[in-house]
Image (cartoon, rainbow, N blue to C red):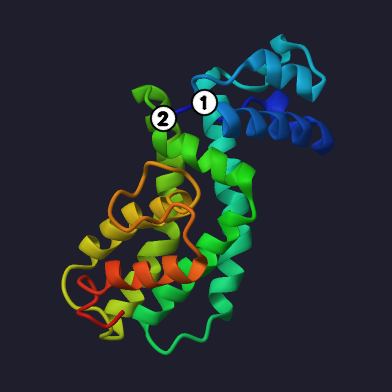
Amino acid sequence: MAELPTDVWRNLPAAKRERVLGAALDEFAALGYSRGSLNVIAREAGIAKGSLFQYFTDKLDLFATVAEEVSQRVRAAIEPRLGQLESPNFAEFVVDALDVWVRWFAEHPVERGVTAATNLEMDPAVRAAVRDVAHRHYLEVLRPLVVAAVERGEVDGDPDVLIAWLMLLVPHLALAPFLPGLDPVFGLHGASPETVRDTVRRLLAPLLGGKA
């Protein structure tokens, strides 16, 4: 697990933190974590490269901080919308929620790029650092929703199986409609939101007893 950012980072003026984060998000969204350049981040943020190592204990710390920032942005945007859905049952709620999810990522290429970097990172240490962050956020949202649906009698079977499946499906749907090479079965790349929604319904039906 990556270390936390340093006190120097936490004590920076908010505007400066935002500049550094913005530069890091842009770089990692474009090139991924391992290929991203600290020199470019420092230049775009208007700081010395050495300052980054005053802000973060190491590269993994920086990477995890970026993953945390994107996770918080996504949750801040998506969670309030989930509370506004008027779906008649849990199966339709999941379809509606994933429709909101896909449409949001269509409009936010930087967050989508960082999400791709998080999910497709090759270096095992980097991958663990950033995906630990993402997994924590997914579980904090998904587990209560699934457990509540089980308690209402809307989901049969092992809730952990459904949670695990959603943990695979949710990030996949943030990327597959927008990046080539991720979906060889349904042809989601470049598909309309309506087509993606229909595909989500097909994917969920076996898990939700044909209710999706």
Can you give x and y, in whole percent of width and height, for residue 73 in the image? 62, 51
Element carrying mark 2: loop
Label 2 sits on residue: 121
Tell me what residue is drawn at x 78 percent, y 30 percent: 12
Q: Quadrant of the C terminus?
A: bottom left
Furthest-left residue in this view: 157
Q: Quadrant of the N terminus?
A: top left
Q: Amino acid at mark 2?
A: Glu
Q: Are marks 2 and 1 in contact (CB under 8 Å)?
A: yes
**Up-down relation of residue 126 to residue 80 (above or below):** above
Which corner quadrant of the image does residue 92 belong to?
bottom left
Tell me what residue is drawn at x 72 percent, y 35 percent: 22
Determine whether, in the image, residue 49 is placed left or right of residue 152: right
**Res. 53 visible in picture:** no
Q: Which mark is residue 33?
A: 1
Can you give x and y, in whole percent of width and height, for residue 162 in the image? 26, 65
Determine whether, in the image, residue 167 is placed left or right of residue 47: left
**Res. 87 visible in picture:** yes
Tell me what residue is drawn at x 47 percent, y 60 percent: 191
Tell me what residue is drawn at x 35 percent, y 77 percent: 148
